[in-house]
Image: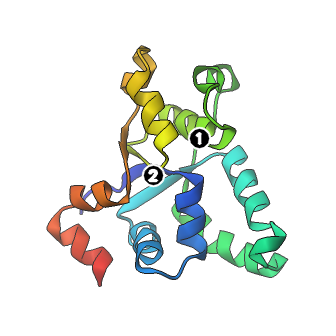
């Protein structure tokens, strides 16, 4: 069996994977549940996720939130972020994207899954060596195309 790809899920992808019922959300969920990907999280990213799930507009009870976390966290790998290596590199990005970049760099991620154009533009114009060290950045369709036929079949069933 292949090693699970270490990924950082952009906060929008993660919430969609947890809360959505469409085919895309199901594929993202199935990817971590089947071990195709190993999502990376930090204490800070989990706290942000918990705050996002508590938004009244989502209508999730505390029990709902706990159940969603229980369906996700066992599949995730926790990365302890070094405060000395955080944030200043990506100050031009929103905090959630800056955190995703830090998590990808410090967690030695294989891929950062995002559809955010601001992050793509930041990478394209960055000349710093650490930006070139950043893992592959993929949107949903590019990620699906990068999978082997058997991996795609695993997610499409």
Q: Give 42 or 3, whichever is nearer the viewer.
A: 42
Residue at 52%, 32% in the rendered image: 106
For this orientation, the residue located farthest to the left is 149
Residue wearing tag 1: 97
Question: Would you call the spot at circle 2 few (<14 residues within 10 Å), some (14-19), or many (20 or more)?
Answer: some
Q: Where residue 141 sits in the image (x, y, percent)?
A: 31, 60
Q: Where residue 149 sits in the image (x, y, percent)?
A: 15, 68
Rendered image quadrant of residue 88: top right
Task: Describe the colour scheme in one phrase.
Answer: rainbow
Residue 129 appears in the figure: yes
Of labels 1 and 2, earlier in sequence is: 1
Q: Give 67 or 137, whichever is nearer the viewer.
A: 137
Rendered image quadrant of residue 92: top right
Q: Where residue 64 sits in the image (x, y, percent)?
A: 75, 80
Residue at 62%, 38% in the rendered image: 99
Residue at 49%, 47% in the rendered image: 116
Quick one: SS at disc 1?
Answer: helix
- Can you say whether 64 is above or below 130 in the image? below
Left or right: 69 as drawn, with respect to 38: right
Q: Where residue 61 sits in the image (x, y, percent)?
A: 82, 80
Residue 108 appears in the figure: no
Rendered image quadrant of residue 36: bottom left
Q: Disc 1 vs disc 2: which is toward the camera?
A: 2
Question: Would you call the spot at circle 1 few (<14 residues within 10 Å), some (14-19), or many (20 or more)?
Answer: many
- Can you say whether 25 is above or below 81 in the image? below
Quarter of the figure that contains the N terminus = bottom left
Disc on res. 115: 2
Q: Give 3 or 66, whichever is nearer the viewer.
A: 66
């Amino acid at each position: 069996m292949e090693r699970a790809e270490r990924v950082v899920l952009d906060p929008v992808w993660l919430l969609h994977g947890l809360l959505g019922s469409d085919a895309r959300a199901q594929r993202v969920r199935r990817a971590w549940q089947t071990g195709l990907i190993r999502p990376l999280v930090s204490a800070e990213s989990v706290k942000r996720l918990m705050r996002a799930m508590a938004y009244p507009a989502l209508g999730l009870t505390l029990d709902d939130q706990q159940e969603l976390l229980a369906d996700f966290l066992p599949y995730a790998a926790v990365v302890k972020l070094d405060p000395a290596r955080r944030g200043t590199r990506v100050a031009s990005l929103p905090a959630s994207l800056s955190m995703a970049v830090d998590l990808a760099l410090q967690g030695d991620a294989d891929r950062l899954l995002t559809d955010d154009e601001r992050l793509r533009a930041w990478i394209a114009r960055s000349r710093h060596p650490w930006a070139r060290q950043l893992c592959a950045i993929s949107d949903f369709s590019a990620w699906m195309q990068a999978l082997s036929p058997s991996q795609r079949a695993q997610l499409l069933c």
